[in-house]
Image (cartoon, rainbow, N blue to C red):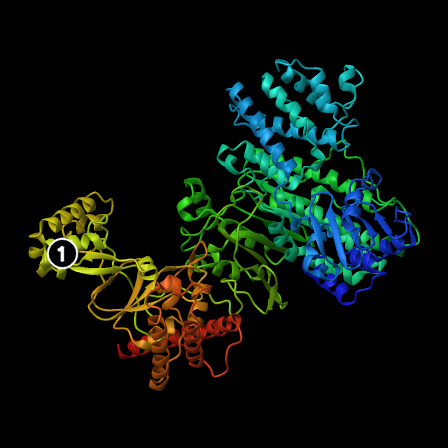
Amino acid sequence: MNASQIEKNVTALVENYNKEEFVFDLLKAYGISKTSITRLKKGDFNLSKVAGEVLYKSKLLFKEVASGDLLNTIDKLTKEPDTLKHNPRFVIVTDYKTLLAKDIRTGLALDIPILEIHKHFGFFLPWAGQEKYAQTNENYADRKASYKMAKLYDILVTENPNIYDDGGHNLNIFLSRLLFCFFAEDTDIFPIEGLFTDTLEQHTQKDGSDTHSFLDRLFKVLNTKDNSQEATSFKAFPYVNGGLFRDPIVSPKFTKEARKIIIECGDLDWSEINPDIFGSMIQAVVNPAYRSGLGMHYTSVPNIMKVIEPLFLNELYEEFEKQKGNAKKLRQLIFRLSKLKIFDPACGSGNFLIIAYKELRKLEILILQELHPLETQHSIVFTELKLSQFYGIELDDFAHEMAILSLWLAEHQMNKFFVDELHGFGKAKPILPLKEAGNITQGNATRLSWADTCPKNENDEIYILGNPPYLGSFLQSKEQKSDLALVCNGFKSYKDLDYIACWFIKSALFVQKDNVKYAYVTTNSICQGEQVSLLWPFILSQGLEIFFAYNSFKWTNNAKGNAGVYCTIIGIQNKTTLKKKIFNQTSFEVVDNINAYLTSGSSVVLKKRTKPLSKIPPMNYGSKIVDSGNLIFSTEEKNELIEIYPEAEVLIKRLLGSAEFIRGKQRWCLYVSDDQLQFAESIPQIAERFEKVKAFREKSTEKSTREMSKQPHKFYYSVHNNSDSIIIPRTSSQRRDYIPMGFLDGDTIVSDAASVIFNATIWNFGIITSRIHMDWVKAVGGRLKEDYRYSSQLCYNTFPFPEINQKQKEQINLHVFELLEEREKHSGKTLAQLYDPNKMPKGLKEAHHQLDLAIERCYRLKPFTSDTERLEYLFKEYEKMIKRNTLLEKGKKTRKTKKA
C-alpha cells in the first residue's frame, strides 16, 4: 500500500471516527490484514491481558488513559522490560482527545489532537514497511560503523604498502568478509552472539602482530564443511560457503591500533545496520574522494521508492487488493512474484536491488496473511522469492562485492521479519550455508551484453531500474566518451549527450516489444534543451513511450553534504493506450501522453531554428567581447576617465548582461568605430587597454580570436545597432514566475550573457514576457541546475504564435504600457526585487495577469485552465505550423523545378 492510499485511509478514519474501533481502524489504514485484526480483537494476537490495552508483537502497544495522565503513562510504558521484549514499534496512549505516540526504534515522539492524526499519517508509515518517510536520514549505527571502517582502512593501507598490487581486489574481499562476520555475530547467523569479536580478542596478541594469521585461519574454517579437527576456539564457527570465503586471500598485517578498531567495530550493534545504505557508505570508505560525505552517492530510500512504486510495486499492490478473498488468484500472484526479474545495470553496492527485494518480500507476507484463513489445509510456508531473481552490473570491484554481501544481509533480515509476521505458519530456511546471492556481474555496462547478464526468456516479466552515472559531456573521461560513441553508433550527433544516455539507449534496445519496463533516476538535462533532439527521437522510434515521470527535484540522500544536482525519474515501456502519470512532490496528474519534455501533450521533438517559426522579429545573441575585461569599465573607472578626458564620453556605452539588467548593476564598455579609432588611441589609458586586448587575443588557441587581435578596439562579435531594443536575460532564477525583460535605448550594448531584439515592437515584448511563453520556456529550454536558460534557437524561434491583426496588437500594447507603468512606480527597486515571487507588488502582478489574458486570447477565446492545458495546445500548434511550413517549402521547390 502506498503513502497516498494510506493518507486517504487515515483521513477516512477521522471522518468516520469510532472511539471503540480506533486502534483497529488505525492498523487497518496502514494495510494490516483484516484477518490479523480479527485475531487481535479475539485476543489471539493481543499479548496484553490488561483491559484497555492492545499489545501487538512488533507493531504497537496501545493504551487508553485518563485525561491528565498521558505523559507519565507513556514514559512508564516505554521503559518497561515486559513491554519492550515484544518489540512494539510504537507505544501509543490516548484519552481520545489527545494522542501521544513514541517510535521505539527512532525515539521520535508525536503529541497531537487525536482528530488531527491524518495530518501526521507519515509518523506511522513503518507499519506499511515505508521507513523512507520516517526521519531516518542519519542512521547512527550505519554512520558510526562506516567511520570506524574508514579508520581501519587507512591504517591497513599505510601498514601494507603493496596492498594495491592486485588492483585492490584482495583488500575488497577481505573487507567484505569482515563485514559479514560483524553482522553474523549480531543477527543469529553465528550461533553465539559476539562470537567473532570475542574469539579474535581472546586469541590474538594485543600488538596486532598475529591478527592477520588468525583471520586467514578463520576464513579457511568458514569455508570448511567439517571443522571437527579444528582447535576448540574455531569449532563453534559454522560453514558459510556461498562463494564469500571460497577463494584464498592473504589478510593484511595489523597494528595494535588496527586490532583495537576491529574489536571496537565488533562492539557495535550490527543488527541495526541497514544493508541498503551500508554498502554505499562502506564503498565510500575505500574511495578517499567520497570521504567528506560518506554515502554521498547513495540513493535515498524515498528516491528509490519513487522509481519502484510506479514501475511495478503499485500495480502489484493493486492486483493484491483486487484479488483479496480469492485464494486461487492470490496463489497466482505469489507465483508471479517468484518469477519477476529485477535488473539494475549500474547497481553500485545494490541499493535499488535491496529495496526492491525487501518491498516484494513485504508484499508476499501480506498476501500470505490474507491467504492463510482462506485455505482449509494449512502447512508451513516458505518465501517463494529468491535472490537469484535479482540482477546487476557494476564496474567497481568493491561495490560489486558489497552488492553481493548486502543482498545476503537483506535476505537474512527479511527472513526474520517473515517468521515474525506470519506467527507460526511461516518459516525461513537456514541462511547457512550461503547460496549464491543474486546475479551481480562486474564490468562496464555500456559494453557488456545485457542479455547475457540478465537472460530474457519468453514470457519473462523484467523491470530495469537504477541510478546510472550522469556526467555531462565536459566531465566525461576519454573512456566514457568512447563508451558513448560505441552505444550511439549510427547516431548523427551524440557528443553533447550526458553519459547516462548510454543506459537509456541500451534499455530501449533491450525492451524490444517484450514484457520489460525500465525507469531511472537521472539528471533533468536529458529532457531539456538540445539534448532532447539528440536522444529522444531514437527512443520513441523504438515503439516506446514514457508512462510516468517526476517533475525535477533536488537530489537528497543520507550524506552530510548532498549532491547539488536536480533530478527527475523517467519510466519507459512499450506503447499502450493506458493513461500516464506525471508526479510532483505531493501528487500526480493523469494524462494521455508524456512527451520528451516531461509534459503532457504531443510527442513532437523540437529542433533548433535559426529563424522564428512565427511572424515575429528575429532575436540575436548579445555582443561577445573576448577582451579579458580590458574593454569594460566600472562606474568609478568610467568617471575617472571622463574627468580627465571629457571628450572620451562618446566612446563609452552602457553594457548590460543578464545579471546587470536584473540586479541593477552598472557596467560600461568602450565601443569604438573605425572612424573613432585614431581619436581613441590618442588617449593613453585607452591605448593601453587596446594593447592588453591584443596581447590577450594573440595567446588564444582559437584562430578566429588570434585574427581579432589585429583589431583590439572591436568586439569579437558585435550585433549592436543604435535602435531601441528588448533585452532578454539568458539566465534567470527558476523561482520567478516571469523572466524579467525590458526596453533599452540605442546607447546600451547587450552582452552575450543576454539576447536582444532590435527595432522591437511593444506587442512583441508582450508576447515574450507572457505566462504562456514562460510555460514554453520552462518546457523546452535548457536549465542551469533549475534556473532558466533562455535560448533564442529553442525558446523563441520555435514558439508557435498566431498571426494577429492590428487591433489585437494595439490591445497588447496597452497592457504592456500598464505593466511598464507599474514597474516605474517602484523605480527604486531592482527587477530582481520586483520579480521576487514573495515580494512582487500587487499592481505589477495584476498587470502581468491582464497581459497574459490578452496574449492567450490571441490563441482562443476560451481561457486556459492550467499550464498543462497551455502546453498541450502549444505543442499541437507547433506541429501544425511545422507541417504547414514543410508543405510551403515543398511547394516552393516544386515551382522552382517547374520553372527550371
Q: Classify the position of the N terminus by image quarter.
A: bottom right
Check disc 1 and give the amino acid type.
Ile
Q: Position of residue 278 (x, y in %)?
A: 63, 37
Q: Position of residue 676 (x, y in %)?
A: 9, 59
Answer with the quarter of the image where residue 830 lies. bottom left
Apparent side of residue 600 relative to residue 419 in the rendered image (left or right): left
Apparent side of residue 63 relative to residue 720 in the rendered image (left or right): right
At 65% across and 27% down in the image, what residue appears? Answer: 265
Which residue is outermost to the bottom?
807
Q: Is residue 165 above or below residue 751?
A: above
Apparent side of residue 229 relative to residue 612 in the rendered image (left or right): right
Residue 160: tell me if it is visible. Answer: no
Q: Nearer the viewer, residue 485 or 392?
A: 392
Q: Classify the position of the C terminus by image quarter.
A: bottom left
Q: Position of residue 256 (x, y in %)?
A: 60, 16
The residue labelled by disc 1 is 642
Q: Nearer the viewer, residue 313 or 508?
A: 313
Q: Is residue 497 above or below residue 579?
A: above
Apparent side of residue 132 relative to residue 852 in the rendered image (left or right): right
Which residue is outermost to the front?
68
Q: Nearer the viewer, residue 431 or 448?
A: 431
| Local secondary structure at mark 1 | helix
Answer with the quarter of the image where residue 578 lies. bottom right
Q: Position of residue 712 (x, y in %)?
A: 15, 51
For label 1, the crowd category at 10 Å Cα-Cα, with few meaning under 14, some 14 to 19 and many 20 or more, is some
Q: Nearer the viewer, residue 379 or 26?
A: 26
Q: Is residue 890 above or below residue 73?
A: below
At 78% across and 46% down in the image, what residue appears? Answer: 72
